[in-house]
Image (cartoon, rainbow, N blue to C red):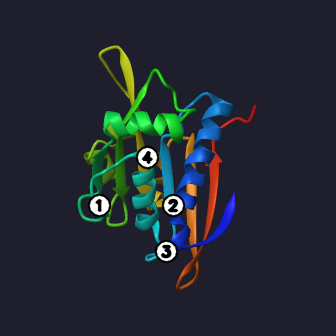
Amino acid sequence: MTIHYTLSQLPEIAQKIIQFQQQIQKENSILANIWTFEGQMGAGKTTLIKEICKQLGVTANVQSPTYSIVNQYDITNNQQNINQKDNQKDIQKDNQINKIFHFDFYRLKDISEAYDIGYEDYFYPQKANGNTYFSICLVEWASRVQELIPENSLNITINIISEDKREITVSESGFKRL
């Protein structure tokens, strides 16, 4: 899917990306929990991620984790329930998406830094109290750690068309179409 958009259309674009992810899940019975974001500096990766987080129910102030490498945002149960009814109908209802992890790998000097932060703990679902708790990982500059990105991922590339216009391409990798 390739779309041209302006900043004023970000809520609509974020919804289209979420719906694309939902379609992948519906067709593959698997949550696409790793979303990679590529584009040159200033293309709007963080701005788009802020809107996606808002659409998924994050109420905290979403900021770029350029220096911290990863930021964590909680999805409150009340907001998640609203999202499951309105936007997230196809997300596995017996499991719970309760966190979003926002990564920025731009400043990594070496891939070992991703190992040092324990990327596996973020990228793979965790079990607690008999339930699997899913997180969504939004990964800026994923190409710097490409060999760590799981096969089943949603890939988002943003290209600058002009000062106020962008082109976004959303694709999936590793999923089997039924």
Disc 4 element: helix
Disc 3 element: loop
- Look at 40% across and 65% down and name the residue there: 46
- Look at 36% across and 45% down and name the residue there: 100
Q: Quadrant of residue 175?
A: top right
Mark 3: amino acid: Ala
Q: What's the CA distance linking mark 3 and mark 4?
A: 22 Å
Q: Position of residue 139 (x, y in %)?
A: 43, 54
Mark 2: amino acid: Pro
Q: Residues within 10 Å of mark 4 (few under 14, many from 20)?
A: many
Mark 1: amino acid: Pro
Outermost residue to the right: 178
Q: Which residue is mark 3?
A: 43
Q: Is residue 100 left or right of residue 23?
A: left
* Circle number at residue 11: 2
Which of the pair 22/40 is nearer the observer? 22
Can see residue 63? Answer: yes
Q: Are marks 3 and 1 in contact (CB under 8 Å)?
A: no
Which of the pair 118/91 is nearer the observer? 91
Q: Earlier in the sequence, mark 3 or mark 1?
A: 3
Mark 4: amino acid: Leu
Disc 2 element: helix
Camera-nearest label, 2 or 3: 2
Q: Which residue is mark 1?
A: 65
Q: Which residue is mark 4?
A: 56
Which of the pair 84/37 is nearer the observer? 84
Q: Is residue 130 left or right of residue 68?
A: right
Can see residue 144? Answer: no
- Look at 46% across and 57% down and name the residue there: 142
